[in-house]
Image (tube, rainbow, N blue to C red):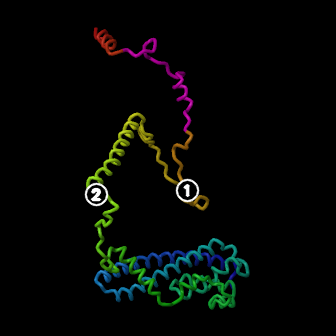
Amino acid sequence: MAPSATLTTRLKVQLKLSIARLRMVQQKDEAESKMQRRAMAQLLEAGKIESAKIRVENIIRSDITTELHEILELYCELLLARLGMLEAATCDAGLEEPVKSIMYAAPRTEVKELQQVRLLLAEKFGKEFMLQAADNLDGKVAEKVLKKLRIEPPPQALVNGYLEEIARTYGVDWPKKPPGDVPKFVDDDDEESPSGGQAQKNLEAPLLAEAEGADERDQLSRATPPRDFGPSSPLRVNPPAPSTDNPHPRVKGTESLDLKPSKKMQDASAGKGLQSRGPVGGTIPDIDELAARFAALKK
């Protein structure tokens, strides 16, 4: 039997290879599923409903297998993160479910790297442990893994739901909606609703009230500038990436920032840094005075 350190190292390598292989298989299955969905849309458009209902079961089974691969990938990442706990002689209670789920599902998948992980785990914890996991004698295998590995025909409601979703995605009119009744636009309540001149008088009153209200709002907007008057702030802050400490990051508005002027700006506003170069007395010369000065300079 190999030493514990060597076995742990080999298990670490195989777990990393299994994660990479599971991701590649998922990407391949997703690409094939897109092609199959496009073919289903063409069958629905051609009116071959029975053929589409039979072939869509392959898409459902492919999606279930992809979900199983995602679960096994998460279990492999969990074992890789807690690899130090696997150095014990017995399996830890917190790792019993992922370990036995991998050992149960590995021979039922086509991922060879996952089967190598199963053999290393069997070598680590013994033959009896492997037999319990292979037949799920103690019920430690995850229920979601057992459900994904069951071979049973999908229910008719699920088949119809898949076909409706495919038809909606690719713009196919299926299922065909029966023609409904023509909507009636004739108003039968002639006694309750006024008509003729009385209706015209009732309509004029709210129209006049709305016109007066619009004039008042126009005058108020002219007297008081709107809040968004002037250039908007050029500051643009991108939200940080989500993390485990802050899964939903948010960016506060610039109005909550405490922007204080620097010391130079305070000195400039108080007149300490620069002195005014204007005329004595602080008045601004008018146009005639400037023209006279310009003429004097020409001489």
Question: Residue at label 1?
Answer: 249
Q: Quadrant of the N terminus?
A: bottom right
Question: Residue at label 2?
Answer: 195
Q: Which residues are magenta?
A: 259-285
Which residue occupies the extreme left position in the image? 196
Instruction: Give SS at disc 1.
Output: loop
Q: Is residue 41 magenta?
A: no
Position of 237 relative to 54 (above/below): above
For image coordinates 34% across by 47% down, the residue present is: 205
Q: Nearer the viewer, residue 186 or 118?
A: 186
Which residue occupies the extreme right position in the image? 89
Q: Is residue 281 magenta?
A: yes
Percent x, y of residue 160: 41, 83
Percent x, y of residue 133: 64, 87
- How many C-alpha atoms fall within 10 Å of the one at disc 2: few (<14), some, or many (≥20)? few
Q: Nearer the viewer, residue 269 or 14?
A: 269
